[in-house]
Amino acid sequence: MSAITISEKALKRICEIRESEKADEQAVLRIGVVGGGCSGLSYKLDFAEQGASTEKNDQEFEVNGIRVVIDMRSFLYLAGTRLDYSGGLQGKGFHFINPNASRTCSCGESFSV
């Protein structure tokens, strides 16, 4: 079971970014939760070389053809989360729909549980 699902729009945008950044096709999408933001916790997305700096308890799985790595602490916060992408004039960017969040900021970039 994966902690998250990725919408088709988000998947398409992830592939576009990976191509524009000339990231290796074997690069994995690292998703995490870090302290910060107006609600206390923020989401983090980046590419990492497959196998690079993975920790023993990292959770690795494939979502819609993308290899995803989530550290165990973040995995606990992200269970059941959906990653979406909006290209509209308002709210353009990636959006996390997290059922574990008890409160989110108005921009959706930070949350608390």
Image (spheres, rainbow, N blue to C red):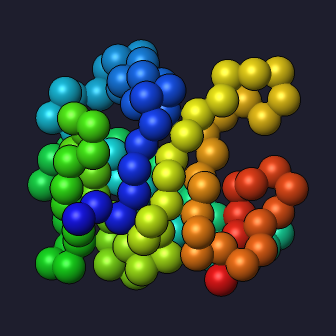
Q: Nearer the viewer, residue 49 or 89?
A: 89
Residue drawn at the location 59% of the way across and 69% of the way down: 99
Residue drawn at the location 49% of the way across and 60% of the way down: 81
Q: Is residue 55 visible?
A: yes
Q: Check the picture and name the quadrant holding the C terminus.
A: bottom right
Instruction: Report the label total.
Output: 0
Q: Nearer the viewer, residue 41 or 9?
A: 9
Q: Check the picture and name the quadrant holding the N terminus.
A: bottom left
Judge whether 8 appears above or below 44 on screen. Answer: above
Q: Position of residue 64 (x, y in %)?
A: 27, 37
| Residue 34 position by quadrant | bottom right
Q: Is residue 14 visible?
A: no
Q: Position of residue 31 (x, y in %)?
A: 41, 56
Report the side of 49 relative to 12 (left or right).
left
Report the side of 112 relative to 38 (left or right).
left
Q: Position of residue 66 (x, y in %)?
A: 25, 38
Judge whether 103 appears above or below 27 on screen. Answer: below
Judge whether 87 appears above or below 64 on screen. Answer: above
| Residue 57 position by quadrant | bottom left
Residue drawn at the location 13% of the way across and 55% of the way down: 51
Q: Nearer the viewer, residue 97 or 42?
A: 97
Residue drawn at the location 65% of the way across and 73% of the way down: 101
Report the side of 72 relative to 53 (left or right).
right
